Image: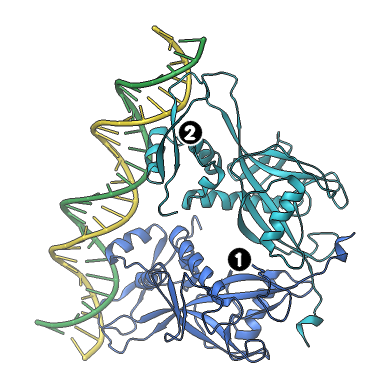
Chain colours: A cyan, B blue, C green, D yellow
Amino acid sequence: MSYKDYERPSVATDIITFGIDSERAENKRELDNKQLKILLVKRGEAPFKGCYSLPGGFLRPEETIEEAAMRELAEETGVKSAKLIPLKPYSKIGRDPRGWIVSCAFMALIRTIEPITSVNSDAESSDWFTITMDGDDISIGEGEIVIKSHEDTAESSQLAFDHGQIIFDAFMKLKDEVVNHDIIFDLLPEYFTIADLQKPYELITGKREAAANFRRKMTKKIEETEMYDNGGAMHRPSKLYKRSSEQK
Amino acid sequence: MSYKDYERPSVATDIITFGIDSERAENKRELDNKQLKILLVKRGEAPFKGCYSLPGGFLRPEETIEEAAMRELAEETGVKSAKLIPLKPYSKIGRDPRGWIVSCAFMALIRTIEPITSVNSDAESSDWFTITMDGDDISIGEGEIVIKSHEDTAESSQLAFDHGQIIFDAFMKLKDEVVNHDIIFDLLPEYFTIADLQKPYELITGKREAAANFRRKMTKKIEETEMYDNGGAMHRPSKLYKRSSEQK
DNA sequence: GCAAAAGTGTTTTCTTTACACCCATGC
DNA sequence: GCATGGGTGTAAAGAAAACACTTTTGC
């Protein structure tokens, strides 16, 4: 019996894209409001029509899964440049009512959030949603979607398929990677202030850092430049830094 | 156009199994010789007939990829109990000469190395091979197979498919998990001495640890028992410890 | 007694934390 | 001047590394 005689599943990929959004503060004294956001699409077709889901789609011949993930992300959301990090395969029986579909999930990290440009036929609309963590529970948007760590996350939300589980797993992985590796830099533009670094760090790890100490912890990993940033704010302008070129 | 109209790849899984092997020292004064080993099978059929490869096989309907991995591991090598950790999907075009095959790779950790019992038709024989790391290069067996970090690992060895790459990626992941999480305990039996803990730790991280300091670093994570271990060795017997029950 | 490993204690060094304080900016 | 964040200094607390030393075992 050859391997070709086995039945084959469809292979899909789902992508959870993280980005940092900066919103100008109303008060010119204060810092920009930063938020961690993820990219969701509203499904325009069954199954789960009207639900939110992660962008994704099916693997095609002559492409790797990474290429498929980048292609789907661009098609459904217009995002073209991202760092891809493999998550894990999701293959539970019945996870997709359409049939036997295995999804290889990826996390994508982008440096700047651009307004959504492109939308293809599968998706009704795609948009950025704020994601926050409180303890081990995750909330998306204005409290619309909550993923509790100790529940069956696939069922407990307005999210399609097992995407609640994927989002939960991804957030935990992101947190782990930020703490143990230097993946936070993949969420920042080339030049950034130390506050640009600290706020996202805190949003993801869930821990407040003392500014003076955080600065020292990071100086090993960054280089200072001769540029300054001050969007007309009423306080001392901040030096711009970049990731140090060694030991990347 | 429905998703069903797309061509589908075959989905496989490959499993890299790590275990710690203890060999009685000849000198009754000395400690057991411990080695990190991985499980390879010698391929009995084309392609790559005669080459070594990771155990693995195709995903079947009505099972998850994790279940497929455990099933294939048991069928090809007799290993029945293991902790599975997802690696990543391997999908490069042409990675398998038989056709379009995507492999979801897993790492499996076992607590005790048993002699190989079962061998199915696909594999000519399966066996444990010592794996060592020197810098970023990895050697398998008695210097028979070497995987260099900066070469095209898929080509440079007697390993089938892209399994050299998978083994390399897995070792790096194992090292990372041992340093940053407490995954070393999944390679040990329930009760162990501190030396049982230290030697594997050093083999995987590639760093020697001072015994007194290593002990202190680990005491937070383990509990002592009232049992002692001394295989008739000419030195003070060691207390047996177990992983602490909290914060697992 | 001897060699080897088990285990404890102490000192030094480095890292993390907490907190006080000065600097620069726009209004 | 004032509020706010940028940035430096310093001391205390905690963790990691280095090293000396005692304990226990089988022969």
In the picture, measured across the screen, residue A181 lies left or right of residue B29, that is right
Residue A138 point in image, percent of width and height: 64, 43
Residue B60 picture quarter? bottom right
Q: Which sits in the foreground, B110 or B205?
A: B205
Q: Which sits in the foreground, A21 or B95?
A: B95
Please, is residue B246 above or below residue C23 in the view?
Answer: below
Mark 2 residue element: helix
C-alpha distance separating marks 2 and 1? 35 Å
Instruction: Give the residue at mark 1.
Output: B86
Q: Residue at x 51, y 58 (%)?
A: B248
* Crowd around label 1: few <14 · some 14–19 · many ≥20 (10 Å): some
Mark 1 residue element: strand
Of the residues shown, which amino acid type is indicated by label 1?
Answer: Pro
Q: Which sits in the foreground, C14 or B134?
A: B134
Q: Which sits in the foreground, A221 or B204?
A: A221
In the picture, measured across the screen, residue D10 lies left or right of residue B160, that is left
In the picture, measured across the screen, residue D22 lies left or right of residue B18, that is left
Residue B246 visible within the image = yes
Please, is residue B54 above or below residue A193 in the view?
Answer: below
Residue A195's tag is: 2
Residue A200 point in image, percent of width and height: 54, 39
Could you tell me which quadrant the C terminus of chain A lies in?
bottom left
Please, is residue A194 above or below residue A149 in the view?
Answer: above
* Crowd around label 2: few <14 · some 14–19 · many ≥20 (10 Å): some
Of the residues shown, which amino acid type is indicated by label 2?
Answer: Ala
